[in-house]
Image: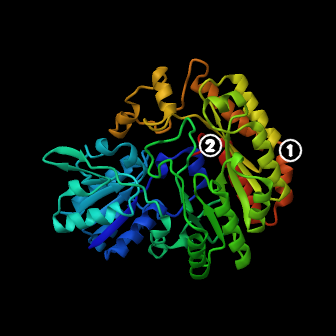
Amino acid sequence: MKILLVYPRHQETTTTLSRVLKNKIPPLGLLYAGAALEKSGHEVKIIDAENENLKLEDLENLAKQYQPKIVGFSVTTPTFKKGREAAQRLKQTIPGIITVFGGPHLASFPKISLEFKEIDFGVVGEGEITTPELIKAIENGENFSKVKGIVFRKNGEIIQTEPRELVQNLDELPLPAWHLIDLKNYQDIMSRKKAFATMISSRGCPYNCFWCDPEGRFGKTFRGRSADNIIKEIELLYNQYKIKEVLFYDDTFTVDKQRVVELCNKLINKNWDLIWECRTRVNLVDEELIKLMAAAGCYRIRFGIESGNDEILKFVRKGITKEQARKAVGWCKKYKIEVFTYFMLGLPTETEQTMKETINFSLELDPDYTTFSPTVAFNKGNDLFKWAVEHNYIPRDYWDKFVRGENLDAFPILETNNLSKKTILHYSKMAYKRFYLRFSFIWKKLKSCRSLQNLKKYLSIGLAFLIGKVEV
């Protein structure tokens, strides 16, 4: 069966920061789905409307040429409306097509999403097993109720089936279908090499931060791909696509330290001209691991530190301390690994004084890059949103209304009795200026410039952080 997978255009729905950076990242979710569908014998085409800057008419023409039987869309909650608009257009253009929506949004809003008639099916959670099963049921006219992890309509009723179990052995999944896109067309201003790819080496995060989404696609159970399986994909990317840099998009890369040690040793033995970055927690690294990661080509680690106040860190269940942050950042500097930190302003129980502490702590740590994001109560399922509702800071039905198109702000900053939106934004702007306009920071970046291209990159990044509102 001919299947078209679409990543809808959404730049206008993203943050100021994202628009300035103009990053275009490969749609990993669709690549995994495409691989699973091809393995099941289907013909698959991917259209990344965001990367190709396609208008609805362009998408319509490409779809008409391809004539798919099924069109799948990968959406987040902020991009859901754009996905719906595209589905409406394609249903008008190609009579009889069946639309399937998946992605993070469907994990949180499965039934509300199916209120829109342009959506025929939703895939809830990990889709590599569910999607081929759903397509088979569509082809054979089988009972959809027997397919786990979907939502559909029957006689006007919206039905959600039994949840799909998480994939326990990620090595059993086919590698992403990289041949369905042109990697040369993607860019990340933060990457050092033009030839880069994104990868997911694990799924799930076992920690319990206040803003964690328990309904997310990957769940809380950590599942890591083996070092051999990761090396297999890197080897494909390196040899066939000439990739020189890998950006690991795992929520928490170093949960299983032994796995990382094994991977690093294999990378060292391969002796590839390859660099990589990852994201993890300051309490999940030690000096020995950082030293090994640096030797294996790791050039940047991103840490979510969030606050410079230990009491707030406890309240939001971050599970780290400022001292752990100091040590982790210090080890990275010792072994010449760049540090990118994330901080949040306006967290629960926050005051102007604690926001000042956070800003001062960022200056003390002096990472290579940092962001200061106003706190947003995303997703109705997490404890941050529940706390905000209990304190009457955000309506209980805010996100339901957003999905239905009644609320238009995809990034509602959390206002409390202590802090107004205006105050939080003031401190966010002040934080960026204090961090990025320091003479020591500017001088350090100028000294590290090796070309005019590097200088332009640093200027673009600095501009983005100075005028950006929210990092997502």
Horizontal side of 292 relative to 429 (left or right) equals: right
Q: Amino acid at mark 2?
A: Gly
Q: Is residue 119 above or below residue 345?
A: below
Which of 367/280 is in front? 280
Q: Kindly indicate the quadrant of the structure image that contains residue 183.
A: bottom right
Horizontal side of 269 relative to 381 (left or right) equals: right
Whichever of callouts 1 and 2 sits on the residue coming sooner in the sequence is 1
Q: Tell me the number on the disc at residue 307.
A: none
Dot 2 surroundings within 10 Å: few (below 14), some, or many (20 or more)?
Answer: many
Dot 1 surroundings within 10 Å: few (below 14), some, or many (20 or more)?
Answer: few
Q: Amino acid at mark 1?
A: Phe
- Any part of residue 437 in sight: no
The x, y position of residue 174, in whole percent, is: 45, 72
Q: Kindly indicate the quadrant of the structure image that contains residue 207.
A: top right
User: Looking at the rendering, in which quadrant would you find the N terminus?
Assistant: bottom left
The x, y position of residue 349, in whole percent, is: 62, 23
Q: CA distance from mark 1 to mark 2?
A: 21 Å
| Numbered disc 2: secondary structure | loop
The residue at the point 69 percent across, 50 percent down is 284
Instruction: Write down the residue under mark 2.
Output: 468
The residue at the point 82 percent across, 59 percent down is 336
Horizontal side of 321 relative to 38 (left or right) equals: right
The x, y position of residue 153, in whole percent, is: 20, 49
